[in-house]
Amino acid sequence: MANLSILKKVATVAAASTVAVMATTGKASAITIDLGGTFGTATSYVYNQGGISVTATGVGANPAETLLFRNSNGLGVVTGNDGNDNNQVDGLDINETLNLLFSPQVKLFRAIFSQVDATPDGDEYSILVDGSFLQSGNIASIGTGTVSVAINNSPFGALYSFTVTDGDDDYFLKAVEVQPIPEPLTMGGIALGATFGAYLRKRYSKKDEKLVKA
Ligand SMILES: [Ca+2]
Ligand SMILES: [Ca+2]
Ligand SMILES: [Ca+2]
Ligand SMILES: [Ca+2]
């Protein structure tokens, strides 16, 4: 009986802590990070919002001369010695890439593009997460101007790479909507608390039945 009462106390504490942990993590919601800003160029731009840090960098034809371009439309990539280049993320020479490095890791819910045009065959995007393909599509098939694209089944990742698929693609990335990853310790706590609580509850219900029968 002494063992039983100790176990019951542990079970109660485990169940209570599970509820408390879930209550705090349940508040995690989407955060929209506006990548637009004052007109300029730089090798990187850093954004801090809602506890998330984002470092933006670009990949162009000549790494030594590749810069980010920023204005109120969002972020683009420019390569200094490329005569074909425009200020957007474009495929005029090589397929440029805009990299966003997140800390902590995030799930990408939406990407908001601007300067989207439909001619000759539309502006396409392609997104990779931590080097693996995530999603691509034709932004111009959804709309022109500022277009919000839903990202399906994004995992949690640190590095999101935005690129293009052909020579006439060009866009600015205006904003991203993301959800930060819950703290790893907190996730472990939920799993441990839930498993332990369930095990103990099962154990008691059996012992209580036996006691009643006796
Ligand atoms: Ca460009
Ligand atoms: Ca195209
Ligand atoms: Ca275009
Ligand atoms: Ca465009």
Image (cartoon, helix red, strand yellow):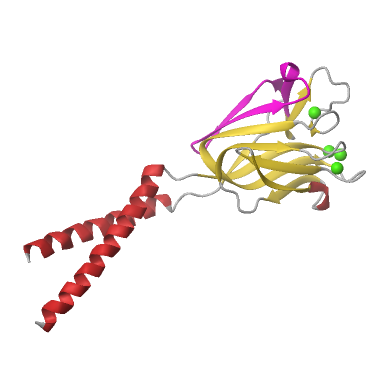
Location of residue 51 with respect to 17 vertically, above or below: above
- In depth, the one of 4 and 117 nearer the eye is 4
Q: Is residue 128 left or right of residue 27?
A: right
Q: Report the quarter where the N terminus lies.
A: bottom left
Residue for point 70% across, 44% down: 112
Q: Position of residue 57 (x, y in %)?
A: 66, 27
Q: Position of residue 153 (x, y in %)?
A: 61, 53
Q: Quadrant of residue 195?
A: bottom left
- In depth, the one of 48 and 189 nearer the eye is 189
The residue lying furthest to the right in this view is: 120
Question: Magenta-highlighted stretch: main secondary structure?
Answer: strand
Q: Position of residue 209 (x, y in %)?
A: 17, 78
Residue for point 60% across, 49% down: 154
Residue for point 72% across, 32% down: 97
The residue lying furthest to the bottom in this view is: 213
* Residue 52 located within the stretch drawn in magenta: yes
- Note whether residue 35 is visible: yes
Query: Number of numbered discs present?
Result: 0
* Residue 91 located within the stretch drawn in magenta: no
Image: magenta residue range: 41-70
Residue for point 20% across, 74% down: 206
